[in-house]
Image (cartoon, rainbow, N blue to C red):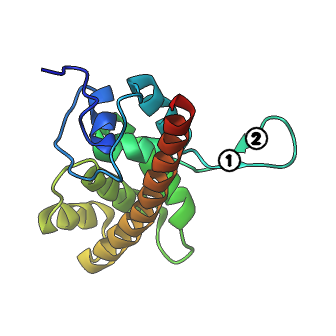
Amino acid sequence: MDWSGKHRPILERIALLAGRGIGISITFGGSSPEVTDQDVAAAVAMTREVKRDGSRNPKSVANCVRPELLMLCHAQQTTLVPVVARACAAVIGRQHVPVVVTRSACVLAAQSIGGRDIGPKSIEHAAWACNVDPRAMASEVGSAAAWMEVELSSAERAFCKAIRRTDQIAA
């Protein structure tokens, strides 16, 4: 029996890095036996968006939490909920919505990405705590979740691209 985990789908191996295998069935072409856990960890880190300004050291884009989203979604690292929620609130914050509503909605959306089942009761409780209409809170949760899904999709594409590069180097 192969205990290395190399036979698992590539995004499942993100979960294994954190000690949490959750049975993800997405393979994105699978992985070759040459890809190690260190390669997977490096690929997660390489998903961070950077600004290239011609200097030798590219700078990280502000509010880029793509590696954190990968670990939150695929490894259920709930300790990353505040990091993701802060970045999301900084990006989606709008003038007409109170900051506390946006922040609460971002926390709920990040918890949802991390595997927590947030239902209507969670939204109602958050709306009550913020003293707003539950429909307004639901709308903000939807906006936050949409931003996180777009970022997660970008992170997964960047991750698979980095893994392919690693796979080509190993070959």
Please report the residue visible at 54 percent of the width from the left and 38 percent of the height from the top.
168
The relative height of residue 165 versus residue 86 in the rendered view (above or below) is above
The relative height of residue 101 versus residue 136 in the rendered view (above or below) is above
Please report the residue visible at 45 percent of the width from the left and 23 percent of the height from the top.
38
- Tag on residue 82? none
Tell me residue 19's x, y (percent): 24, 25
Which residue is labeled 1 in the image? 50
Which residue is labeled 2 in the image? 58
Q: Earlier in the sequence, mark 2 or mark 1?
A: 1
Badge 2 density bin: few <14, some 14–19, many ≥20, Cα 10 Å: few
Name the residue type under label 2.
Pro
Tell me residue 16's x, y (percent): 27, 30
Is there any visible trace of residue 45 in the rendered image?
no
Between 74 and 164, which is closer to the camera in this rendering?
164
Between 160 and 15, which is closer to the camera in this rendering?
160
Q: Is residue 91 left or right of residue 156?
A: right
Tell me residue 85's x, y (percent): 42, 51
Marker count (numbered): 2
Helix, strand or loop status at disc 2: loop
Helix, strand or loop status at disc 1: strand
Name the residue type under label 1.
Val
Instruction: Tell me the quarter of the picture where residue 128 sits.
Output: bottom left
Tell me residue 1's x, y (percent): 12, 20
Please report the residue visible at 19 percent of the width from the left and 67 percent of the height from the top.
124
